[in-house]
């Protein structure tokens, strides 16, 4: 029997789930969200979109294949979505104290401790998920017995500002010039883009890129509410008046649409997982997509220049739009999918990059 | 930009083609490699078609299936699934579509043959779903490799060869070890590993007997084996529904492996890669429907090989359906009709789309069930050919929980990963290296003996992660053992946290009790109860969770449930309304209990539902229809142990529990449930015990003056000898509470008797071992009936074609009986009435009788549905389970107006054997059951029914040469008529020494052949190898010889060379008589309703 410190998860609705600590022995408060992906905990935890979240994995067995090496080459992480863990806490059912994978160098627990992230196992993650499904996303506190609560007030910080790069970063030496507005970009997206003949200028979220010389703009994914990105929206608004290709992804999709004047709505518990089905509006083509967001664009509020392109097959929320005449396209999900390329929606990147 | 929108919006929704009548091919009898999963997939497909208003025609001789029940298909033909018969049905029915993907390899092969011969084109029949060309691309190894080469997907380097010489050459080039497999063969039939040329010669010959094309491949032993289930629609939309990982590495057939879903040791990168490959393959091949992709995956890198692609529903797809809740077969059928995935709904949530990839929040283990102990001489080593006869699926929220549940579910007396009777293993290293059906328990032993994870990994190549998890179980049991308590009271002092941990790791109350040493101070059952009581007191209780395909993201509308200890809240809201009726299922398919009990369970559920109760099923067999979540109101996919059933009963608070439709497992629970005051519907537990307990039953028969073979309960050797002096050998020895004759044997002499008694005593200490007089040359007659308050409501009497001595599960059964004296029938009815009254039966029951002249003896009586219930129900067209269930619900039932005497046709149930899968096993029949499945065919008379049934279980009418060795003198006499008939019909007979002399003496022309032990030409074995013999009739001289003998060699060669073999004289005569007196062409092509 592993004699770990007692810990508990206290939800804002009063529910308490008792378990054991397997991460850093601190307590933390955050927004509790669940993710339904069955693999990919290293990637999900380092996704900047998870900033400030107490992440609940619905798949109960976590830690099985350990954690790969933290390797950063030319400012891009080889195996992760960013340089560090962005979730503020981890909630799971069953932790694998031992791991097994040729590519692993340490256990999940060791990694979490290194990065000062608290984590709890032995709790009924399905019940937590059901509560969030019924009552919506809520705050929660992960309390490790005997530890003091870290005062992290997520509410008062601008998450995008925290996770975005602080200076301009360049990647690649290809022909086309792409501005990547970093609202919390996943490194996977940069890795995918670098497969094209492109040079990327990664700029902070509030950077005025109008002065740059470029062939196209991509507005990245990022954490939570687009309302906090007023500066980005203002910059994109200017870009929309021109004719150079623009693509929005995730949070970037919301920013792009808001720049057009559309509004967004907060979903009850968001879309978090690898299996979100989307369909071409009135078409026969469907795609399985990877998503991690809480807001959705209200397509009805878009101007007449735009058409709704994709829709979520589960709840009919908007998943993508396209400008009628200009080379602007925007999707709510991550169109890339690691390494091997050519998955469900990577053709979107092909289309976009082809327009540069 | 406009172009871009155009590019993307392309793909309009097309109108669907219209079908009026669709033919579905079933898979026939259950056999190793092709079992109940195809009843499940066929049933789902038929349901999908029915919804569309399409008229459905089904060909499947497996009469015990749910798919061949009333209301599933519109027309049912109990005919062989062979091109000959299917064409005849096509000619008659003129369907406009055909489904080939739902009846396993049997249906697929038949479909390919019909396509190649132009039959499908001739009758203008469209193949729904995946095209035949695509099927052939996946089935023909060479085409397959070429096809995948086109898209740069790696396959296992292999060479297709057509001669043994080429096979040798190929192996030399690839380098040993190599794997040999026959093309177009199900479940790896005729395949295996060869380390050298000698082994290759042997295997290749066998493989060539199954297929003209044999594949020689480089072996990748030790790689991981991963499977993906993929669905694609005609719009090119693809999803991967589930991925699965084999616990056992490559080298062990996936049907022989413990399989885990989803994969556990693959990272997100690994999974994305394999998913992308699977989709690329499926798109390139052009699958429309469901498909399975199997990979070999390097444990040390991201290197892979595609092993194979199954362009049809498979065992794995049935498992994936049950594991995720995604109804693959149903969706595949709809796609075949032209639906896009986006047009279908997720049938669990009813609101979300069927185009999605399930996210599960539990872990699933499939564990194979073997019955190798039932076969004399069988090779126990597992390899690339499948030997298991069934499987279980267990669900947990930890791997430890799932695997321990699963190991209990397989029902071979194991209590989990630990806490079992000590295995005796001479060489642990060897037992780890060379896997057998016991390997998981060898790992348990090794871990306890101090082997490190690394050592076991090196010997087994089972991923360290699995071994680490198993080690957790061992650590916990050791912690419990260290606490050894000396009294029931001390149990309460144990750390509650340890108790909870043990439960989360899937320990049963029994395992905990045993680890604590409670068995030393109280009975086994009390030990478990002590733990249970303590557990309830401290609040360590299981919770019920839903399987909902979306990890709770959306509310589920179905109640597909499992029980776990890693949770705090039920997903189900229990109201205690007393409206539930729980039906206990039949567990893993195994020899002696298979699809027939699934049929019984499903019928019971339907009747319960129709009468306004909530139908609740507990079962854990992924190959069944009863574990389909829409067959009942609540499905608990969980254990049928006393502990778990009580857990569920305490939650459900049901009106009652039905224990009589699931075979022996629920039947055995009756007394213990009764002792907890559970309301058992129908016949009382006490009566069940009175019938099961030989002592009590016999005393009752004596009391009511009913005869039985003389018997004696064994308590001392002295008594035994005295008894045998009186009745003489042979005697039948068996313990009570037997299933399918397990541990039952005929002993012909003192030596055998003493040896066997030692074995039998190991099987069950609790119930006395019984010896009875074995009556030779007696007819065996079965009474299947339903009674209400002791009065028979409906009944069916059937007779065995074989004489008593062949297990009733192996016998060929005829209904209505054709050769019974009227007086025999009358007496059987009378005795049955007496027994029903005496035991106050309310519900289904079965009595087996011996009849010699008009002397009737009772062999045994089961107060539950028997194996033959679906057969007699369907032939009689009276659903006995529906009646029985109504009786058990306390509803008034009317006696049916017709009886078996009104039938002007005959039903014959014949057994399917899978000896070809069971290397080295002696293919003889005896009191121990050996068949893996059965068919039931209807004919206008006995010969036509016999012929159809025999063809349905794989017999082929011999062309020319028949080899006879007809055993003992009386058998020779009995076979004489049939031999004459064969000669008259122009067959050429070959006979071994004694048989040849006897035939010659009686004027039957024949050629003598020599036994392997004899010098001289022609040699029987050589003739078989040269394929000069079309059928072998080999009647063993006695029922007990276990040694390697001439007869064994001939029988085994016939099996290995795929030559039809019959080993029973009565069956041989009936079959020969049938094919000599009637032409196959004259078999009536009549559907069930036309009789």
Image (cartoon, coloured by chain):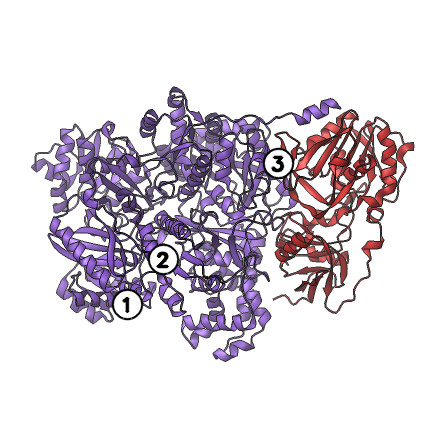
Chain colours: A red, B purple
Give the crowd class for mark 1: few <14, some 14-19, many >=20 residues within 10 Å. many
Please state the total of marks drawn on the protein image: 3
Looking at the image, residue B571 lies above or below residue A306: below
Residue behind mark 2: B889
First in residue order: circle 2 vs circle 1: 1
First in residue order: circle 3 vs circle 1: 3
Whether labels 3 and 1 belong to a single chain: the reply is yes
First in residue order: circle 2 vs circle 3: 3
Residue B852 location (% of width, % of height): 13, 53
Give the crowd class for mark 3: few <14, some 14-19, many >=20 residues within 10 Å. some
The answer for how far apart the CA atoms under marks 2 and 3 are is 53 Å
User: Would you say the residues marked 2 and 1 are in contact, meaning their CB atoms lie under 8 Å apart?
Assistant: no
Look at the numbered disc 2 and give the secondary structure of its residue: loop
Quadrant of the rendering where the N terminus of chain B is positioned:
top right
Residue behind mark 1: B768
Look at the numbered disc 1 and give the secondary structure of its residue: loop
Q: Is residue A335 visible?
A: no
The answer for how far apart the CA atoms under marks 2 and 1 are is 34 Å
| Closest to the observer, B795 or B1039 | B795
Q: Badge 2 sits on which subunit?
A: B
Looking at the image, residue A236 lies above or below residue B485: above
Residue behind mark 3: B276
Residue A149 location (% of width, % of height): 79, 64
């Amino acid at each position: 029997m592993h004699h770990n410190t007692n810990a508990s998860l206290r939800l804002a609705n009063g529910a308490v789930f008792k378990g054991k600590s397997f991460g850093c022995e601190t307590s933390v408060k955050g927004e509790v969200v669940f993710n339904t992906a069955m693999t990919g905990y290293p990637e999900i935890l380092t996704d900047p979109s998870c900033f400030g979240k107490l992440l609940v994995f619905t798949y109960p067995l976590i830690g099985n294949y350990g954690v790969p090496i933290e390797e950063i080459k030319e400012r891009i992480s080889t195996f992760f979505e960013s340089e560090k863990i962005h979730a503020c806490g981890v909630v799971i059912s069953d932790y694998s104290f031992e791991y097994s994978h040729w590519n692993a160098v340490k256990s999940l627990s060791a990694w979490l401790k290194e990065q000062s992230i608290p984590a709890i196992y032995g709790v009924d993650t399905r019940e937590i998920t059901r509560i969030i499904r019924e009552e919506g996303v809520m705050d929660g506190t992960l309390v490790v017995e005997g530890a003091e609560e870290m005062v992290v007030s997520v509410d008062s910080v601008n998450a995008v500002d925290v996770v975005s790069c602080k200076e301009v970063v360049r990647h690649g030496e290809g022909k086309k010039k792409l501005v990547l507005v970093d609202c919390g970009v996943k490194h996977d997206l940069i890795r995918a883009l670098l497969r094209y003949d492109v040079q990327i200028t990664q700029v902070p979220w509030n950077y005025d890129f109008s002065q740059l010389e470029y062939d196209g703009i991509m507005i990245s994914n990022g954490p939570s509410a687009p309302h906090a990105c007023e500066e980005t929206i203002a910059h994109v608004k200017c870009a929309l008046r021109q004719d150079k290709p623009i693509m929005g992804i995730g949070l970037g999709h919301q920013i792009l649409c808001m720049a057009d004047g559309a509004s967004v709505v907060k979903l009850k518990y968001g879309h978090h997982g690898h299996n979100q089905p989307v369909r071409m509006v009135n078409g026969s083509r469907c795609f399985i997509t990877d998503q991690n967001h809480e807001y959705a664009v209200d397509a009805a509020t878009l101007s007449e220049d735009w058409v709704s392109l994709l829709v979520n097959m589960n709840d009919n929320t908007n998943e993508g739009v396209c400008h009628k005449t200009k080379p602007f396209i925007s999707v709510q999900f991550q169109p890339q999918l690691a390494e091997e390329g050519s998955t469900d929606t990577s053709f979107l990147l092909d289309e976009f990059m082809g327009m540069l | 930009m406009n172009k871009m929108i155009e590019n993307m919006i392309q793909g309009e929704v097309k109108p669907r083609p219209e079908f009026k009548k669709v033919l579905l091919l079933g898979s026939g009898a259950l056999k190793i490699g092709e079992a109940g999963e195809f009843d499940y997939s066929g049933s789902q497909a038929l349901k999908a078609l029915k919804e569309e208003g399409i008229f459905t025609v089904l060909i499947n001789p497996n009469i015990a299936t749910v798919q061949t029940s009333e209301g599933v298909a519109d027309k049912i033909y109990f005919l062989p699934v062979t091109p000959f018969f299917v064409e005849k049905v096509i000619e008659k029915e003129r369907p406009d579509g055909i489904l080939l993907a739902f009846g396993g390899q049997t249906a697929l092969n038949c479909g390919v043959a019909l396509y190649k011969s132009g039959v499908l084109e001739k009758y203008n029949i469209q193949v729904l779903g995946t095209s035949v060309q695509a099927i052939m691309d996946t089935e023909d190894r060479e085409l397959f490799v070429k096809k995948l080469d086109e898209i740069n997907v790696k396959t296992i380097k292999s060479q297709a060869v057509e001669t043994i010489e080429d096979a040798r050459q190929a192996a030399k080039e690839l380098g040993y070890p190599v794997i040999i497999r026959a093309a177009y063969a199900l479940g790896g039939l005729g395949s295996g590993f060869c380390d050298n040329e000698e082994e290759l010669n042997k295997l290749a010959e066998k493989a060539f007997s199954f297929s003209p094309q044999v594949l020689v491949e480089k072996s990748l032993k030790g790689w991981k084996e991963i499977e993906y289930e993929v669905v694609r629609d005609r719009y090119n939309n693809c999803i991967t529904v589930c991925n699965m990982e084999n616990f056992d590495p490559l080298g062990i057939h996936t049907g022989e492996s413990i399989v885990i879903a989803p994969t556990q040791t693959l990272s997100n990168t690994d999974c994305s890669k394999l998913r992308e490959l699977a989709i690329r393959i499926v798109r390139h091949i052009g699958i429309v429907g469901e498909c399975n992709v199997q990979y070999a995956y390097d444990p040390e890198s991201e290197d892979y090989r595609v092993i194979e692609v199954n362009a049809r529903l498979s065992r794995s797809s049935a498992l994936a359906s049950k594991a995720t809740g995604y109804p693959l077969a149903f969706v595949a059928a709809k796609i075949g009709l032209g639906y896009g995935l986006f047009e279908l709904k997720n049938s669990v949530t009813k609101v979300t789309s069927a185009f999605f990839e399930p996210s599960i929040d539990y872990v699933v283990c499939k564990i194979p069930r073997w019955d190798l102990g039932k076969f004399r001489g069988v090779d126990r080593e597992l390899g690339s050919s499948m030997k298991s006869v069934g499987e279980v699926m267990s669900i947990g929220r930890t791997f430890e929980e799932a695997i321990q549940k699963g190991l209990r579910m397989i029902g071979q007396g194991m209590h989990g990963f630990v806490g079992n009777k000590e295995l005796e293993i001479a060489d642990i290293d060897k037992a780890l290296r060379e896997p057998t059906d016991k390997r998981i328990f060898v790992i348990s032993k090794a871990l306890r003996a101090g082997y490190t994870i690394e050592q076991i990994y090196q010997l087994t190549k089972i991923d360290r992660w699995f071994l680490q998890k198993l080690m957790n179980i061992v650590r916990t049991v050791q912690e419990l053992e260290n606490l050894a308590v000396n009294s029931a009271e001390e149990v309460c002092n144990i750390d509650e946290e340890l108790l909870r941990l043990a439960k989360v790791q899937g320990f049963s109350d029994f395992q905990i009790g045993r680890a604590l040493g409670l068995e030393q101070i109280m009975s086994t059952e009390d030990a478990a109860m002590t733990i249970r009581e303590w557990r309830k007191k401290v609040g360590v209780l299981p919770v019920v969770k839903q399987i909902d395909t979306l990890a709770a993201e959306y509310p589920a509308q179905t109640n597909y449930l499992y029980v776990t200890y890693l949770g705090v809240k039920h997903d189900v809201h229990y109201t205690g309304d007393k409206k539930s009726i729980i039906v206990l299922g039949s567990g893993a398919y195994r020899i002696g209990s298979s699809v027939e009990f699934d049929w019984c369970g499903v019928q019971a559920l339907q009747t319960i539902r129709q009468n306004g109760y909530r139908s609740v099923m507990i079962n854990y067999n992924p190959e069944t229809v009863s574990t389909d979540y829409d067959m009942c109101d609540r499905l608990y996919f969980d254990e049928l142990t006393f502990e778990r059933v009580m857990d569920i009963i305490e939650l459900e608070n049901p009106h009652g529990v039905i224990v009589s439709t699931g075979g022996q497992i629920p039947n055995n629970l009756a007394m213990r449930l009764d002792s907890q005051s559970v309301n058992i519907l129908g016949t009382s537990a006490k009566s069940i015990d009175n019938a099961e307990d030989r002592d009590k039953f016999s005393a009752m028969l004596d009391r009511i003056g009913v005869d039985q073979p003389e018997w004696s309960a064994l308590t001392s050797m002295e008594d035994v000898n005295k008894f045998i002096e009186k009745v003489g050998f042979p005697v039948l020895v068996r313990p009570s509470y037997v299933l399918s004759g397990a541990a039952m044997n005929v002993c012909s002499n003192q030596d055998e008797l003493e040896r066997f008694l030692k074995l039998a005593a190991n099987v069950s200490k609790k119930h006395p071992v019984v010896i009875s007089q074995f009556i030779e040359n007696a007819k065996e007659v079965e009474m299947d009936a339903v009674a209400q308050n002791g009065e028979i409501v409906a009944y069916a009497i059937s007779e065995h074609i074989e004489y008593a001595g062949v297990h009733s599960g192996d016998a060929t059964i005829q209904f209505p009986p054709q050769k019974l004296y009227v007086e025999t029938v009358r007496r059987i009815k009378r005795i049955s009435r007496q027994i029903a009254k005496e035991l106050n039966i309310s519900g289904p029951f079965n009595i087996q009788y011996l009849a010699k002249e008009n002397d009737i003896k009772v062999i045994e009586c089961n107060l539950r549905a028997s194996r033959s219930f679906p057969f007699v129900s369907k032939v009689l067209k009276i659903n006995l389970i529906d009646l029985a269930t109504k009786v058990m619900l306390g509803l008034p039932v009317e006696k049916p107006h017709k009886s078996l005497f009104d039938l002007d046709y005959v039903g014959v149930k014949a057994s399917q054997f899978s000896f070809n899968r069971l290397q080295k096993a002696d293919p003889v029949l005896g009191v121990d059951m050996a068949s893996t499945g059965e068919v039931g065919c209807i004919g206008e008379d006995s010969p036509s029914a016999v012929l159809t049934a025999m063809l349905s279980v794989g017999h082929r009418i011999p062309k020319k040469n028949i080899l006879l060795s007809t055993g003992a003198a009386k058998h020779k006499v009995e076979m004489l008529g049939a031999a004459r008939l064969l000669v008259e019909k122009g067959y050429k007979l070959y006979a071994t020494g004694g048989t040849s002399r006897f035939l010659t003496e009686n004027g039957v022309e024949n050629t003598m052949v020599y036994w392997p032990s004899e010098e001289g030409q022609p040699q029987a074995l050589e003739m078989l190898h040269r394929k000069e013999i079309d059928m072998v009739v080999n009647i063993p001289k006695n029922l007990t010889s276990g040694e390697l003998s001439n007869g064994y060699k001939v029988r085994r060669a016939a099996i290995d060379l795929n030559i039809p073999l019959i080993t029973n004289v009565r069956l041989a005569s009936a079959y020969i008589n049938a094919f000599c007196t009637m032409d196959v062409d004259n078999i009536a092509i009549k559907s069930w309703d036309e009789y």
